[in-house]
Image (cartoon, rainbow, N blue to C red):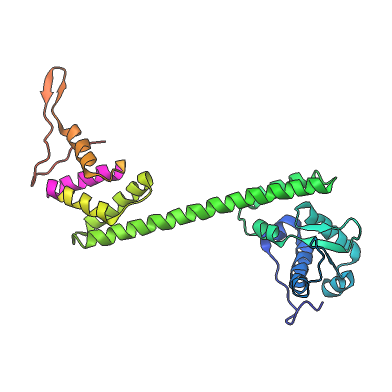
């Protein structure tokens, strides 16, 4: 088979799982032909072009009958349409195919394809299911891209927070704690800025210089996602106020600079 200059052909593994090896090879050959069709503008107003079946057979060894079977398989997922007037006049939807093959969830695609294969009586049915495939895949791709963008933003916020804290302290433990706090703040509010970080740090260090107390306060910030230190402070102080148990007053040691506090707060 004279496939190209190097006598090779590229096939997509995802498509291979969906339609099988023969149809995948046939599709790859169509993809080699398609640029020529567009460049020479040999398609009609509806996008159909005349496929040279003899050329396909010379290239990949598929008979006309085999090619028609491949057209049928590809038609079932909406990526190839055959003219009602001429079986050699075809239209290719490469955009839909791209959406299908770049999606990673093969089982979901296969379930849709299997459902489609059960109802191929009319062209409208094919179009309906092809449209269903495209909508589902495009939705999943948008969600995937959205999640990836959110993750990248989150990483950026955490990096910026760590860099900001590194300008305010040389304590690596504080840098790590503030990184975790920034992640919690982003999970709650969706963003964090250098001004928020700096204000929280200044309010925290003004309130206490005791390392144990600072860690407890930051742990509260990490668990609650509070970006305003006032809320963190109130949360802490609510837990160290005197309590009455069975008529007996119990005093839990409050925050004081320079003293250790091992209060359980969660």
Residue occupying the far top of the picture:
247
Q: Which residues are magenta?
A: 206-223
Q: Position of residue 136 (x, y in %)?
A: 64, 48
Q: Position of residue 186 (x, y in %)?
A: 36, 49
Residue 45 relative to residue 99: left or right: right
Give the residue at x 12% y 36%.
254
Point out the image quarter for the N terminus.
Answer: bottom right
Residue 216 relative to residue 147: left or right: left
Q: Position of residue 168 (x, y in %)?
A: 19, 60
Q: Is residue 264 visible?
A: no
Dividing the picture into quadrants, the one containing residue 240 is: top left
Q: Main secondary structure of the magenta part?
A: helix
84 within the magenta span: no
Point out the image quarter for the C terminus.
Answer: top left
Along the line of sight, which residue is nearer the eye, 160 or 112? 160
7, above or below 99, in the image:
below
117, above or below 20, in the image:
above
Residue occupying the far bottom of the picture:
5
Dividing the picture into quadrants, the one containing residue 228 is: top left
Residue 260 relative to residue 56: left or right: left
Give the residue at x 81% y 43%.
119
Along the line of sight, which residue is nearer the eye, 1 or 112? 112
Q: What is the number of callouts on the image?
A: 0
Q: Is residue 13 visible?
A: yes
218 within the magenta span: yes
Q: Position of residue 5 (x, y in %)?
A: 74, 82
Give the residue at x 77% y 66%.
25
Give the residue at x 11% y 35%.
253
């Amino acid at each position: 088979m004279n496939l190209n200059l190097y006598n090779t052909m590229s096939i997509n593994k995802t498509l291979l799982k969906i339609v099988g090896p023969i149809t995948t090879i046939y599709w790859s050959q169509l993809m080699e032909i398609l640029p020529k069709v567009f460049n020479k503008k040999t398609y009609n107003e509806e996008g159909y072009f005349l496929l040279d079946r003899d050329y396909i057979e010379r290239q990949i060894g598929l008979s006309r009958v085999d090619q028609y079977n491949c057209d049928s398989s590809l038609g079932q997922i909406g990526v190839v349409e055959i003219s009602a007037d001429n079986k050699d006049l075809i239209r290719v939807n490469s955009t839909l195919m791209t959406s299908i093959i770049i999606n990673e969830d093969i089982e979901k695609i296969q379930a849709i394809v299997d459902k489609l294969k059960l109802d191929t009586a009319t062209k409208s049915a094919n179009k309906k299911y092809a449209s269903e495939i495209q909508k589902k895949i495009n939705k999943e791709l948008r969600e995937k891209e959205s999640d990836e963008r959110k993750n990248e933003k989150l990483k950026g916020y955490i990096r910026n927070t760590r860099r900001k804290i590194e300008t305010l302290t040389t304590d690596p433990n504080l840098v790590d704690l503030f990184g975790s706090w920034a992640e919690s703040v982003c999970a709650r509010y969706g963003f964090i800025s250098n001004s928020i970080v700096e204000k929280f740090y200044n309010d925290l260090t003004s309130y206490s210089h005791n390392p144990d107390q600072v860690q407890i306060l930051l742990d509260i910030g990490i668990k609650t996602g509070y970006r305003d230190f006032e809320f963190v402070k109130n949360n802490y102080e609510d837990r160290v106020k005197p309590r009455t148990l069975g008529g007996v007053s119990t005093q839990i040691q409050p925050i004081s600079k320079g003293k250790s506090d091992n209060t359980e707060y969660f």
